[in-house]
Image (cartoon, grey):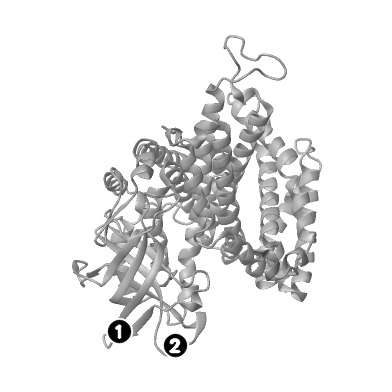
Amino acid sequence: MPVYKAPLRDINFCAKELFGTDQIRELPGCEEITDDLFDAVLTEAARFCENELQPINQSGDLEGCHWDNGKVTTPKGFKEAYNKFVEGGWPSLAADPKYGGQGLPDSLQVFTEEMVCAANISFGLYPGLTRGASILLHSHGSDELKDKYLPKMTDGTWGGSMCLTEPHCGTDLGLIRTKAIPQQDGTYKVSGTKIYISSGEHDLTENIIHFVLAKIPDGPKGIKGVSLFLVPKIKVDDAGNLTDENGVSCASIEHKMGIKASATCVMNFEDSEGYLVGELHHGVSNMFVMMNTERLGVGNQGLGVGEAAYQNALAFARDRLQGRSLTGTKYPDKPADPIIVHPDIRRTLLTMKAYNEGNRMLSAWVALQLDKSHRAEDPQVKQDASDLVQLLTPIVKAFFTDCGHEVANHAIQILGGGGYLQDYGVEQFARDARIAQIYEGTNGIQALDFVGRKLPAYTGRYLRQFFHPVLAFIEEHQDSDVLKDYLPLLQKNVARLQQTTSILALKAMGNPDEAGAASVDYLRLFALTVLAYLWAQAVLVATPKKDGEEAAFYQGKLETARFFYTKLLTQTSSLFANIMGGADPLMTINDESFGPF
């Protein structure tokens, strides 16, 4: 059976030592978020994830969800675990106290989400979708809708879902056919079919609140005619009581490669009573509030699964005896050395460790900016923080999930034949991680969004929120002995990223295919540069403490930073070359030349 231990020590390094929880306490409403409170919440979250969620992860995968006559039953143990999740107050952690939330900072929510995803990604999708739906309703719903639905969504009594994709269209939402017919009482009759709907139907909550994109008759064509509607599975009266079924049904559930304990549904809406959320014809822009929340959450899925995969690979590498070290026996008391002595195993483990810990630092940085964007009193601080979140969201979604799947595959390789078997549970990590690169906008779409929207937004305003602090950091520490082996490489990579950004912007003005052809490589180039900046900060923090009581932890930080800079950051050279190769090698080949012949 797989193992998982919440990485609380590393989370504390990110939250307290790298960025400092004092930055959170300076924000309105967070004055009482002491380190003791921070520790208490995360320790209890770790206990719940380790003892309640992780033990049903593999069994949930083997059993999967069950569909019968429109009803979905989750695997054994899921409903009981969800009830405990609700009893513990976890759905309301960072929610608005006005609707029953605890009002805790997003930073705590993000770290908790990582642990949930690491322990049981399928389980995490149910409350994760509800949280995103609640944020959407809170942002764009009328006071009447918020008062009616948010309290029970906040406490976990009701679930939520996001209904976008249809059988004939995915990313191009302007093609949707779902209709919403206005009624005299101000409601709408919503009819249509949606596919790939996570948490669209299940037995964990007594009601599910669907947020559905649809078009009204005679509205504008394409994406400008799409509106957003709240459609409950079961109708709710003015007193908040459940009344009648609402024409919402689950036609089937998908049989998938992974996340088998998460219900992925085909949903039918037949004259279902719906309520407009926000203004007419602003459905897609409104839905992006939820989509961006979910994209950050999906990034956490990649990080969480990557952490679980690393822990299992590390445990195996320490225990598995195979051959002797190339430089002589390291464990003479054993019949063979554990495989962790071999260079390729160490390379693989360090790759996993460097990505996981680097991404956790980035996750913590984004979470802090989320808190500032929501709570800061200074309008400029709010705007700057929001801009940085906007810039980094596609990186978190795409890079974290690429790394998550890569790390999971590394774990399979380290376990060898055992990694390929269900018995060890590691192959599940690779299957579960794979979907995170696809849903909430494929990683290719994230890359296009990054180069097509984020870079040129407000004449590069988003970009300045990264380049300005990193250049200031380089200037401040130019003469640092601690960073003498790192700062020149960081400076070189930042300069290369600036050069690439300028060249790409100019080329794309003449030919948009240039941006599309470079987008995936550019996003990864940017992500690696961000991690280089964060690893340099980690070196500054760890160096003075490397000979203290936690010498092994801090020495591990320094050694992992050195590995990242010398073995992983070097990817930026080939990424730069790929980008400079331009669009022609991709776009000049005729469609017919792809085959078959």
Asked if labels 1 and 2 touch by Cβ distance under 8 angstroms, the answer is no
Instruction: Please tell me which of labels 2 and 1 falls first in the chain.
Output: 1
Q: Position of residue 17 (x, y in %)?
A: 58, 39
> Which residue, given by chain and number where applicable, does mark 1 sit on?
186
Q: Amino acid at mark 2?
A: Gly
Q: Report helix, strand or loop for mark 1.
A: loop
Direction from residue 360 to residue 500 in the image, left or right: right
Taking depth in this image into account, of 51 and 428 the one nearest to the observer is 428
Q: Position of residue 114 (x, y in %)?
A: 47, 46
| Quadrant occupied by the C terminus | bottom right
Tell me which residue sits at (75%, 63%) in the image.
Answer: 501
Above or below — where is 258 with respect to 148?
above
Above or below — where is 163 with respect to 401?
below
Direction from residue 193 to residue 458 in the image, left or right: right
Tell me which residue sits at (58%, 38%) in the image.
Answer: 410
Direction from residue 177 to residue 250 in the image, left or right: left
Which residue, as the protein is rendered here, is positioned at the far top? 333
> Which residue, given by chain and number where applicable, does mark 2 sit on?
219
Q: Report helix, strand or loop for mark 2.
A: loop
Taking depth in this image into account, of 293 and 428 the one nearest to the observer is 428
Above or below — where is 429 with respect to 594?
above
Label 2: few (<14), some or many (≥20) within 10 Å?
few
Q: Position of residue 279 (x, y in %)?
A: 43, 80
| Quadrant occupied by the N terminus | top left
Q: Amino acid at mark 1?
A: Gly
Mark 2 vs mark 1: give the one in front.
Answer: 2
